Amino acid sequence: MPPADDALILFLDRLGLSGLAEAMRAAAGSEALTPLAMFVHADVVVKVVMLGLLAASVLAWAIWAAKLLQLARARRSLTQGYRALAAQGRLDAPRTGRGPIARMRAAAVAEIAASEGLPDAGVKERVAIELARIEAGAARAMQSGVTAIGSVGSTAPFVGLFGTVWGIMNAFVGIAQSGSTSLAVVAPGIAEALMATAIGLVAAIPAVLLYNHLTRAIGGYRAMLGDAAALVERTLSRDLDRARHAPSAESPLHLVAE
């Protein structure tokens, strides 16, 4: 058994995957063309390609699961903040949480305080700019990591094809060295090489589906952020109108004096 295979089997033993390690030992001494035996007998470059594709597939699934949890938490927080603001009807009402809508409310209140005495139109415009910045930042944070899944889906077939081409090259070199064109000599090397393309497709097809699913889910989250920003702007407009039309403290005294 090549030293690289010994090192891989030892690594699997240390990870606690003794069953898989024993299966690899058995496959190394077997002549059957099982997937595990083909992997063990493949060239070291083809093995690296296969392992890399398997790792990329695991990474894509892990990112997808983590993003689903992150999206669920973000949606729940956004929904709670939206309902709270809609029920309170004022930006300066007590706020809870640290989600995007809480940052939007804080930015609007801060802009009102900083723009005291200035026209309402300018206040609304500056708040709209800040809300757009917060909305874009929240969407960008949710999008991070999703491009890795798309990269796996787009590049895995080509990486697998590289492993196949390399393996077939080695198979033909073996044929030339042995001087035999028997199918029994040619078939194992070609089968091992084609396995790299198969693993590439196994990694790419789910990655594309996961990427499309996350893209649609994040699109829905972006729409929720837009609704939250619109609610903050409507509440801001009502707060400014209330402040402008509120009776001043001096008006009743002035009327009494008259």
Image (tube, rainbow, N blue to C red):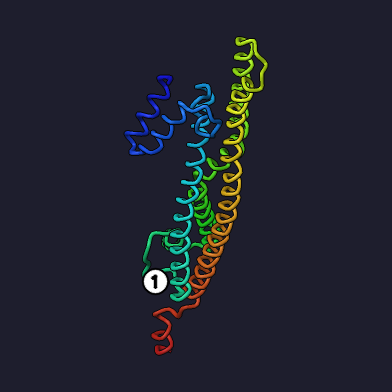
101 versus 83 height, above or below: above
The image shows residue 8 at horizontal and vertical percentages of 40, 28
**Residue 122 seen by the camera:** no
Q: Residue at x 39, y 85 (%)?
A: 253
Would residue 195 be found to the left or right of residue 251 on screen?
right
Image quadrant assignment for residue 17: top left
Q: Nearer the viewer, residue 217 or 202?
A: 202
Image quarter of the C terminus:
bottom left
Q: Residue at x 48, y 49 (%)?
A: 141
Q: Nearer the viewer, residue 2 or 202?
A: 2
The residue indicated by pointer 1 is: 93
The image shows residue 239 at horizontal and vertical percentages of 48, 72
Q: Residue at x 67, y 16 (%)?
A: 181
Image quadrant assignment for residue 24: top left
130 versus 86 height, above or below: above
95 versus 15 height, above or below: below
The image shows residue 214 at horizontal and vertical percentages of 55, 52
Would residue 53 be found to the left or right of residue 6 on screen?
right
**Residue 214 seen by the camera:** yes
Image quadrant assignment for residue 112: bottom left
Q: Amino acid at mark 1?
A: Ala
